[in-house]
Amino acid sequence: MFFGINDAFHFSTDGDDFNTVKNGTEEFVLGKVETVHVLSKENRVLILTRDSQTTDYLFGFDLEGQLLFKVEPPEHYHFWYLSGKQVACTEADDQAKKSPLSGWWFSIDLLNGNMEMGSPAY
């Protein structure tokens, strides 16, 4: 499978769900891509990876394919799903703040990937 943002920045997948992003000659190994959000107005591409064998990551690129950040889920949480400039997270352990629903929304700082807890998510 091939998905391109522009001529220099694209994703590819082989038969083993091995995903990469290419920016010219630079290649980033992502693992198993769960979700990709292209935020054209903000000049950002957010990529959420999920893999039961490794750590999940949220990657942030600009539209030219420059890696801006690679972050793990907030402490005591697992990534759940990505929606625009927010990521929903579920509790990973007893030290996480308990949600009245299924998890919490975390706002994503598009410059550095820092996340701030917001409202409950379902």
Image (spheres, rainbow, N blue to C red):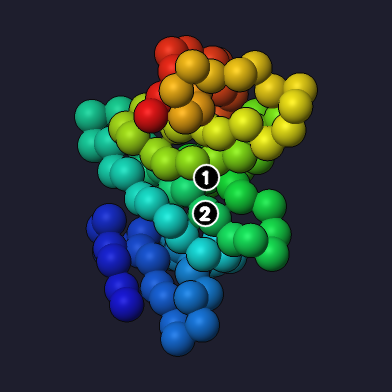
Regarding residue 111, the answer to whether it shows in the image is no
- What residue do we see at 58% from left, 24% from top? 114
**Amino acid carrying mark 1 in the image:** Phe
Left or right position of 115 against 87: right
Residue 36 in percent (x, y) is at 36, 50
Q: CA distance from mark 2 to mark 1?
A: 8 Å
Q: Is residue 93 above or below residue 37?
A: above
The local crowd at label 1, few if under 14, some if 14 to 19, many if 20 or more residues have their Cα within 10 Å, is: many
- What residue do we see at 29% from left, 43% from top? 38
Return the residue found at the far left: 41
**Residue in the foreground of this view, choosing between 88 and 99:** 99
Q: Which residue is mark 2?
A: 49
Answer with the quarter of the image where residue 53 lies. Answer: bottom right
Q: Which residue is mark 1?
A: 59
Residue 6 in percent (x, y) is at 26, 58
Is the C-beta separation of discs 2 and 1 under 8 Å?
Answer: yes
Q: Is residue 21 above or below residue 98?
A: below
**Amino acid carrying mark 2 in the image:** Thr
Residue 9 in percent (x, y) is at 36, 59
Residue 26 in percent (x, y) is at 54, 64
Q: Is residue 84 above or below residue 48?
A: above
Answer with the quarter of the image where residue 112 lies. Answer: top right
Helix, strand or loop at disc 2?
A: strand
- What residue do we see at 62% from left, 31% from top? 91
The local crowd at label 2, few if under 14, some if 14 to 19, many if 20 or more residues have their Cα within 10 Å, is: many
Identify the mark nearer the N-term, 2 or 1. Answer: 2
